[in-house]
Amino acid sequence: MFKKLFKNKNMNQENSESVEKDLINDEIVNETEAAAPAEGVESAEELTVEEKLGEELAKEKDKFLRLFAEFENYKKRTSKERIDLFKTANQEVLQALLPVLDDFDRAMVQISKSEDEVLLKGVELIHTKLKDTLVSKGLEQVELKAGDAFDADFAEAITQIPAPTADLKGKIVDVVEKGYKLGDKIIRFPKVVLGN
């Protein structure tokens, strides 16, 4: 009997140790299971935070690229405007000198009729020097002559007269005032007479 009690006691001890081990194992498993979903939730939250940060980064990168492109366009536009300004900066001065050039042309015609060759030579030198200076600043004459077809984009018709010949109908009969351009821009249109 004593053996039985001792055996029962050992069994009880083993059972209680086993029960304790089971309880400890259950607690560990429960803690692990409880911890696992919490970690999963944190990782899901971390993923959403990472996704949000990624989206914000993408938005900021897009804003930066747009701003950079806009700035590059601004630089190109201002440099183009600056170049255009340099090309036409002296336009007003050249326009103011055009009547002087016209007067020189008329004076040359009248002086060439006189017999004073020294006077003609002197005025010719000054006229050539003025023309060369204006050409060096970008001034060009618009080339039109009698018999050319009329184009309203390049000439201004001041009057119409009956055409002296049939082939001059609708064409330029005479150029009253020369036209000039600065670069590609016409700063004074030539004034012409049309044949009707």
Image: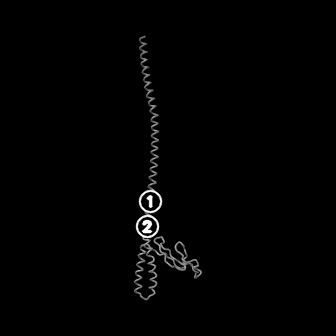
Q: Which numbered circle lies on residue 85? A: 2
Q: Secondary structure at mark 1?
A: helix
Instruction: Give how far apart the Cα atoms at labels 1 and 2 are.
Output: 16 Å
Displayed quadrant of residue 166: bottom right
Label 1 Cα neighbours within 10 Å, binned few <14 / some 14-19 / many ≥20: few
Displayed quadrant of residue 139: bottom left
Q: Residue at x 42, y 69 (%)?
A: 89
Q: Residue at x 48, y 74 (%)?
A: 188
Q: Position of residue 169 (x, y in %)?
A: 58, 78
Q: Position of residue 100 (x, y in %)?
A: 44, 78
Is residue 3 placed above or below 192 in the rendered structure? above
Q: Which numbered circle lies on residue 92? A: none
Q: Residue furthest bottom?
A: 115
Displayed quadrant of residue 13: top left
Tell which circle, 1 or 2, labels the residue nearer the N-terminal end: 1
Q: Which residue is mark 1?
A: 74
Is residue 65 placed above or below 123 in the rendered structure? above
Figure label count: 2
Q: Position of residue 33 (x, y in %)?
A: 46, 31
Foreground: 177 or 75?
Answer: 177
Q: Secondary structure at mark 2?
A: helix
Q: Residue at x 46, y 39 (%)?
A: 45
What type is the residue that disc 2 sits on? Leu
Label 2 Cα neighbours within 10 Å, binned few <14 / some 14-19 / many ≥20: few
Foreground: 22 or 155?
Answer: 155
Q: Residue at x 44, y 27 (%)?
A: 27
Q: Position of residue 124 (x, y in %)?
A: 42, 82
